[in-house]
């Protein structure tokens, strides 16, 4: 049950905050910047208003998740820190002497209260509204790109994930006390997941028995990460993979297993739209959605800046219809030709190869036809026939008994003359220099907000993680821009 009334904090110790949380503290600035009542309004239908025990205020629970993203900590660690960090208690609208929540309630909040809420778009909308209200958005351009996030659970071996986490824990313990090597259980020699789970539990038990060692902050972080995997995600580990994660390709020789976050950002470096997909989806297909979502936030857009992945024919036509300048270099393999079965075979610009609907990448390509006669030339892509023979999607794609599987693209260089002329202009070259900004934003998400690895399994979990991380970076950016404008 939640109350519709705002709780008035009556505490003789509230003046402490004026002393220990200065005005330039980031969390105080976020509290001053954002009216978080929108969270209560959005989530109240997921609570009972007149029955049951009093629930922790949804705004406070939401803020806990936001703090998790800002500081990249586990549920246990962020709750522990909120016991003694006065800036966190101030941000959470708590009196200094108030008891903190049980960390397990955050899991329930994520699963029960945030269901059916389009949190990602709602939070981006909120931050862009604030930025427009503060008049810090001046540009009429967006920069688009995609970044990948690896699944928390490895596609082939969840056992390896457990081994890595227990190894990291043992490593920090040994830095403090090497004699702990004698107290840890012998490593498992089997390939059974159950044995590795049992081993990790024994490692946890061994560390927790050592009162002095377990209280070191770096030990607690690694310990809590390992415990969180065992306690919250054991069922997913037993499934041996993340059910929504997919194989995506970064280059011709490297791939990842996980998700893609497709991002639109203005030149002030505020993210204006996001689409989160499974890892195999191509970047270019998300462009039109990113533009439309950005406009829905109130952004005025004249220019769209991206790499070659966004210069396919449909996007150029869309830009022309909507009077947009598309600053994206042409790639002859995708913009000079007519692709067959476009819904099945998509071009991966990083690898320079086509990928079939099952996620298999071509292994080589060859150009055929007479040189200089573009209408007769083709790029032919060859696929691994052994994979095609056993592919579950081979029906209608691979002919039984065939000795090869190829996919051809006809080259027609005359179709994009206007875009080609724009590409060679000084204006295009100047605007394309802005692309570095989104690459820096992707790096910030990954290295400061834990966005390189998914914090849970499933596309819904990835969208929640993305919502909190992007809300965090946008708020921090708005605060920075407001300081610069003074």
Image: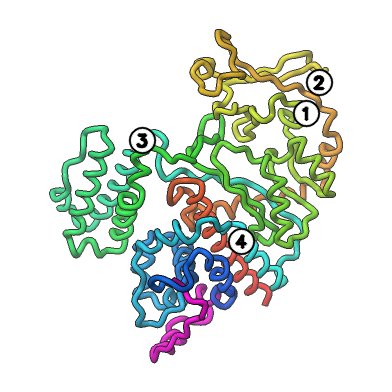
Q: CA distance from mark 4 to mark 3?
A: 36 Å
Q: Position of residue 243 (x, y in %)?
A: 45, 39
Q: Quadrant of the C terminus?
A: bottom right
Tell me which segment is drawn in magenta.
Answer: 1-29
> Which is closer to the viewer, label 3 or label 2?
3
The residue labelled by disc 1 is 336
The residue labelled by disc 3 is 157
The residue labelled by disc 2 is 374
Q: Position of residue 412 (x, y in %)?
A: 80, 25
Residue in the foreground of this view, choosing between 201 and 231: 231
Q: CA distance from mark 2 to mark 1?
A: 9 Å
The residue labelled by disc 4 is 122
Taking the image as shown, residue 165 lies to the left or right of residue 54, namely: left
Q: What is the basis of the colouring in this image?
A: rainbow
Circles 1, 4 touching at the beta carbon (< 8 Å)? no
Q: Secondary structure at mark 3?
A: loop
> Which is closer to the viewer, label 4 or label 2?
4
Q: Earlier in the sequence, mark 3 or mark 1?
A: 3
Main secondary structure found in the magenta portion: loop
> Which is closer to the viewer, label 3 or label 1?
3
Residue in the foreground of this view, choosing between 311 and 157: 157
Q: Quadrant of residue 425?
A: top right
Q: Is residue 17 magenta?
A: yes
Residue at 56% across, 44% down: 260
Taking the image as shown, residue 259 lies to the left or right of residue 353, namely: left
Circles 2, 1 touching at the beta carbon (< 8 Å)? yes
């Amino acid at each position: 049950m939640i109350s519709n009334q705002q709780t008035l904090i009556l505490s003789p110790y509230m003046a402490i905050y004026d002393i220990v949380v200065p005005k330039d503290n980031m969390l105080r600035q976020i509290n001053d910047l954002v009216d978080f009542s929108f969270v209560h309004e959005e989530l109240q239908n997921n609570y009972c208003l007149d029955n049951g025990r009093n629930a922790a205020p949804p705004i406070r629970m939401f803020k806990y998740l936001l703090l998790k993203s800002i500081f990249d900590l586990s549920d246990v660690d962020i709750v522990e820190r909120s016991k003694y960090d006065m800036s966190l208690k101030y941000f959470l609208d708590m009196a200094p002497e108030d008891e903190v929540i049980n960390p397990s309630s955050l899991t329930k909040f994520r699963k029960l209260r945030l269901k059916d809420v389009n949190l990602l778009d709602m939070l981006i909308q909120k931050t862009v509204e604030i930025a427009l209200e503060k008049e810090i958005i001046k540009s009429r351009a967006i920069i688009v790109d995609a970044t990948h996030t690896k699944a928390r659970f490895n596609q082939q071996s969840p056992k390896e994930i457990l081994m890595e986490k227990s190894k990291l824990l043992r490593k920090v313990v040994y830095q403090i006390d090497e004699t702990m090597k004698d107290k840890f259980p012998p490593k498992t020699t089997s390939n059974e997941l159950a044995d590795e789970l049992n081993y990790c539990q024994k490692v946890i038990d061994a560390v927790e028995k050592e009162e002095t060692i377990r209280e070191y902050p770096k030990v607690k972080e690694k310990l809590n990460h390992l415990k969180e995997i065992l306690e919250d995600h054991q069922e997913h580990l037993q499934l041996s993979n993340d059910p929504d994660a997919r194989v995506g390709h970064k280059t011709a020789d490297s791939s990842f297993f996980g998700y893609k976050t497709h991002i639109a950002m203005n030149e002030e470096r505020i993210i204006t739209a996001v689409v989160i997909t499974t890892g195999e989806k191509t970047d270019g297909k998300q462009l039109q959605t990113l533009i439309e979502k950005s406009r829905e936030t109130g952004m005025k857009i004249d220019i769209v800046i991206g790499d070659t992945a966004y210069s396919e024919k449909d996007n150029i036509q869309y830009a022309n219809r909507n009077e947009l300048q598309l600053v994206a270099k042409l790639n002859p393999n995708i913009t000079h030709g007519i692709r067959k079965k476009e819904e099945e075979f998509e071009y991966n610009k990083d690898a320079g190869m086509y990928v079939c609907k099952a996620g298999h990448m071509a292994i080589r390509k060859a150009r055929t036809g007479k040189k200089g006669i573009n209408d007769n030339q083709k790029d032919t892509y060859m696929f691994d026939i052994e994979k095609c023979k056993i592919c579950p999607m081979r029906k209608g794609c691979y002919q039984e008994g065939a000795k090869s599987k190829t996919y051809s693209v006809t080259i027609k260089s005359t179709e994009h003359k206007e875009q080609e002329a724009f590409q060679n202009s000084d204006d295009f070259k100047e605007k394309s220099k802005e692309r570095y900004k989104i690459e820096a934003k992707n790096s910030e998400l990954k290295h400061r907000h834990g966005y390189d690895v998914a914090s849970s399994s499933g596309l819904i979990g990835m969208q929640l993680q993305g919502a909190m991380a992007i809300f965090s970076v946008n708020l921090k950016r708005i605060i920075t821009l407001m300081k610069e404008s003074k």
